[in-house]
Image: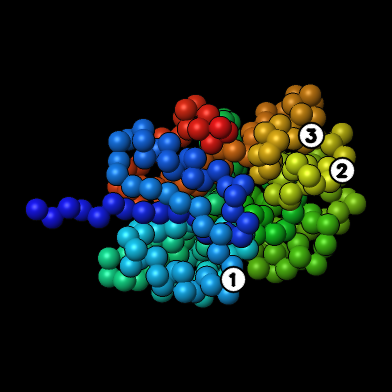
Amino acid sequence: MSLEKIPLAGVIGSPIAHSKSPQLHTHWLRTYGLPGAYIPMDVSADDLADVIRTLPKMGFVGVNITVPHKERIMELADLVTDRAILIGAANTLIFRKDGKVHADNTDGYGFIQNLKQYSPAWDPKSGPAAVLGAGGAARAVIAALLDAGVPEILLSNRTRVRADALKQEFGKRLQVFDWVQAGNMLEDAALVVNTTSLGMLGKPQLRVPLDGLNKRAIVTDLVYAPLKTRLLIEAEEAGCTTVDGLGMLLHQAVPAFERWFGVRPEVDSATRAAALR
């Protein structure tokens, strides 16, 4: 009698102890009664290549990749999806049966699905999106918004040169504002997205003035610790619809879980509760 190998998955980063992914995937494995395990792994940059080569031999079907390895991992994969190439980073690896390592980026997918779930009335074509920040998360968000049909992206970053570099790359639908003018770009925005770490626990507050916010705008923050950042509290007080950042984390995990374990999981209130435990 041959017993099937138990599929293993996990998340690789450094540090990794703060990751909510193990709680999330373990919750889904239990909910759907699936064999498998999901393990957090603190791996240094020096060991990354060796670890990626070894994991499939140990029964791993794939892993998530987080900071600081999301760019470097692209060089170590055999196949990289178009969207990961466009974003310049990967967050999901699939170890294929033919031995090939397949890299993808599901962050933009997670961002859009979170918006659709908690603000179903959002219409991408309703007006410009104002994006704060120009790092890896901003790249994923911009690529997803342009793909969804947002007519224009208004972009501002503390270091302008990084925002200008994104304009060069993504083209004429991006308009760059100096950081001191970031408050002004909110007036025309139908959607406002904070992709910076400002407002996160232990980080400085986001100090962009919000008095110009359009009451009909949807405001979302990628920060999910705290769940309600000052940006979301003030936007709510101004009458805006707000969407917290936890849903993006949950939704970006869906395609990976499905590929690894063969079941497409649902993001519901029990999933949120499991991630917050």
Decide which of tag 3 and tag 2 comes sooner along the chain. 2
Identify the secondary structure beneath mark 1.
helix
| Kind of residue at badge 1 | Ala
CB atoms of marks 1 and 3 within 8 Å: no
Q: Disc 1 designates what residue?
A: 45
Q: Earlier in the sequence, mark 1 or mark 3?
A: 1
Residue under numbered circle 3: 230
Percent x, y for residue 172? 68, 62
Of 250 and 1, which appears nearest the observer?
1
User: x, y (%) of residue 41?
Assistant: 51, 57
The circle on residue 178 is none
- The x and y percentages for residue 130 are 73, 47
Q: Residue 207 has which mark?
A: 2
Indicate the secondary structure of the residue bearing disc 2: loop
Residue 126 in view here? no
Left or right of 200: which side holds 271? left
Of the two numbered discs 1 and 2 on the same chain, state the one appearing first in sequence: 1
